[in-house]
Image (cartoon, helix red, strand yellow):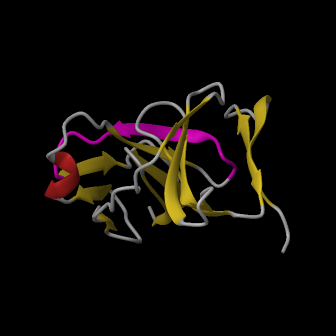
């Protein structure tokens, strides 16, 4: 059986390398999922075989510098529902976030909108269930949205036609 390794590499938004860390290296480790944490850093979940040959879950959390805190609990299931409409759009785009994520007011929800070249066109703080992006200051084209809300990350594209 081949050895499993979890290597995380931190980069800035401009592509500069910030840190690289090898977290797990074992034949008896099975990573399952990786997600952004609601604090700067990442969360990795999976399973490992303990010293008694029993399968146990792991949860690995990094801070913004790649330092780790290992926990031992399963990652909670998220039930985020996020929709974007109309698409294509002309004057506005609605970012609609369902109540189950809004009710946790400790999590800030942000949508970054970039043009096709990756330049930031707008940054929107989601303040309630439905937030409207006024597209009057952007030209026609394809725009990418990146929604961050706790461990939930959604990306997609929207077409603006003027």
Task: Judge from the rendering whether residue 59 lies leftward or rightward of residue 1; answer left or right.
Answer: left
Where 124 falls versus 151 (above or below)?
A: above
Magenta highlight range = 117-129
Q: Give the x, y percent position of residue 14.
A: 73, 32
* Residue at the spot 19% in from the left edge and 60% down from the top edge: 98
Q: Give the x, y percent position of residue 45.
A: 53, 56
Task: Judge from the rendering whether residue 46 lies leftward or rightward of residue 95; answer left or right.
Answer: right
Residue 47: image quadrant is: bottom right
For this orientation, the residue located farthest to the bottom is 1
Q: Give the x, y percent position of residue 112.
A: 47, 43
Q: Which of 59 and 87 is in front in this view?
A: 59
Location of the C terminus (image quadrant) = bottom left
Where 80 falls versus 35 (above or below)?
A: below
**In magenta segment, residue 123:** yes
Q: Can residue 45 be seen in this view?
A: yes
* Residue at the spot 14% in from the left edge and 56% down from the top edge: 99
Q: Is residue 6 visible?
A: no
Where 137 falls versus 35 (above or below)?
A: above
Where 62 falls versus 155 (above or below)?
A: above
* Residue at the spot 25% in from the left edge and 50% down from the top edge: 132
Q: Which of 17 and 131 is in front in this view?
A: 17
Q: Give the x, y percent position of residue 7.
A: 76, 47
* Residue at the spot 51% in from the left edge and 30% down from the top edge: 40
């Amino acid at each position: 059986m081949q050895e499993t390794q979890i290597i995380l590499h931190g980069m800035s938004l401009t592509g500069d390398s910030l840190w690289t860390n090898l977290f797990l290296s074992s034949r008896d480790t099975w990573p399952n999922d990786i997600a952004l944490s609601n604090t700067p850093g990442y969360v990795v979940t999976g399973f490992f075989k303990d010293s008694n040959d029993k399968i146990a879950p792991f949860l690995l959390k990094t801070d913004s510098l790649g330092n780790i805190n290992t926990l031992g609990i399963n990652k909670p299931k998220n039930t985020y529902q996020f929709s974007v409409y109309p698409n294509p759009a002309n004057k506005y785009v609605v970012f609609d976030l369902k109540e189950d994520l809004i009710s946790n007011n400790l999590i800030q929800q942000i949508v970054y909108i970039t043009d096709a070249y990756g330049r930031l066109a707008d940054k929107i703080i989601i303040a309630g269930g439905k937030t409207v992006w006024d597209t009057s200051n952007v030209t026609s084209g394809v725009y990418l949205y990146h929604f961050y809300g706790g461990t939930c990350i959604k990306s997609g594209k929207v077409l603006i036609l003027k």
